[in-house]
Image (cartoon, helix red, strand yellow):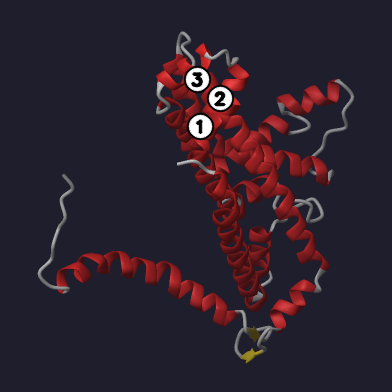
Amino acid sequence: MRKKVIFRGVALPYLLLAPQLLITLVFFFWPAGMAVWQSTQREDAFGLNTEFVAFENFTDLFRDPIYLNAAWNTVVFSSAVTVLALGSALFLAVQADKHIRGAGLYKTLLIWPYAVAPALAAVLWLFIFHPSIGLVGKALAVIGVQWDFRLNGGQAMTMVIIAAAWKQVSYNFIFFLAGLQSIPTSVLEAAAIDGARPMRRFWTVIFPLLSPTAFFLLVVNLVYAFFDTFGVIHALTRGGPGNATETLIYKVYVDGVQNLNFGSSAAQSVILMVIVIGLTAIQFRYIERRVHY
């Protein structure tokens, strides 16, 4: 029987909600409001005076080829990181869910990368792909591949995609494995008795039952690729070479911290926030229809 808590007044419920509301107000609505206000301002070179310029910071951005290049880099980077991280994690979770010797050890080792800090993960991949001392870098040179991510933009983007996706695979793996283990064995046995082969069982039985988990991870991974990959990019390439790996979140840092153009940086933050809210709304509006709870 479901129990309900009944309050005699409204004071106690509001008091219990107050800490969460205060945290949301201080750490989300207030910074977001300041970013929106700052995006309509323009400061002089010394930061002493500000001028209200309405939407001029936004129009300047959409005429800036460097900003448009960063937007395209973000599309490529976010799509590749999401697909690679989700696909790899699902494959590993399916393999770890099988009855094999040492499965517990494999699961533990696959979870470890999630505890590695983004900057440390970037340094790890830097040593692996370094053209002079890295294992992969030297192996590519032996087979004749001219590998140098410091000079080649495509190679630099490939390296940051792999590093960022690797950092997120463990997180996805935990959720996929939990989802796989929650599927009743009787359902899989019934499908096997009906003659469904392993691949057909996966696409017609297992994957539809995993769709709520996959949908949740799709949203989380896109947000991760947009907002939480600054450390990896900064440690590996610093947006280079030639802005080849400069994404929207990294350009916010460059304009705000390095160039001290606070109005443009705030406008970029607002655009980034609108993009992520829009993507999340689209996912809930259209993709969630294909999710079976």
Which quarter of the figure is the N terminus placed in?
top left
Query: Residue at label 1?
Result: 173
Measured as percent of width and height from the top left, residue 172 is found at: 52, 36
* Relative to 289, residue 155 above or below: above
Q: Is residue 164 visible?
A: yes
Q: Are marks 3 and 1 in contact (CB under 8 Å)?
A: yes
- Quarter of the rendering containing residue 275: bottom right
Residue 230 in picture, x, y percent from top left:
61, 53
Q: Secondary structure at mark 1?
A: helix
> In the image, residue 152 lies at what x, y percent?
84, 43
Q: Quick one: which residue is furthest to the left in this view?
A: 8
266 relative to 85, above or below: below
Q: Look at the image and tell me whether residue 123 can be seen.
A: no
Cα distance in 3D space between marks 3 and 1: 9 Å
Pointer 2 or 1: first along the chain:
2
Is residue 240 left or right of 261 when viewed as pictured?
A: right
- Residue type, numbered disc 3: Ala
Residue 144, quarter of the rendered image: top right
Q: Which residue is mark 2?
A: 92
CA gap, disc 2 and disc 1: 7 Å
Report crowding for label 2: few under 14, some 14 to 19, many 20 or more residues within 10 A (C-alpha).
many
Report if the CB atoms under discs 2 and 3 are less than 8 Å apart.
Answer: yes
Helix, strand or loop at label 2? It is helix
* Residue bearing mark 3: 96
Q: Which residue is rendered at x = 64% and y = 69% of the image?
A: 271
Of helix, strand and loop, which one carries label 3?
helix
For this orientation, the residue located farthest to the front is: 194
Q: How many neighbours does mark 3 have within 10 angstroms: few (below 14), some (14-19), or many (20 or more)?
A: many
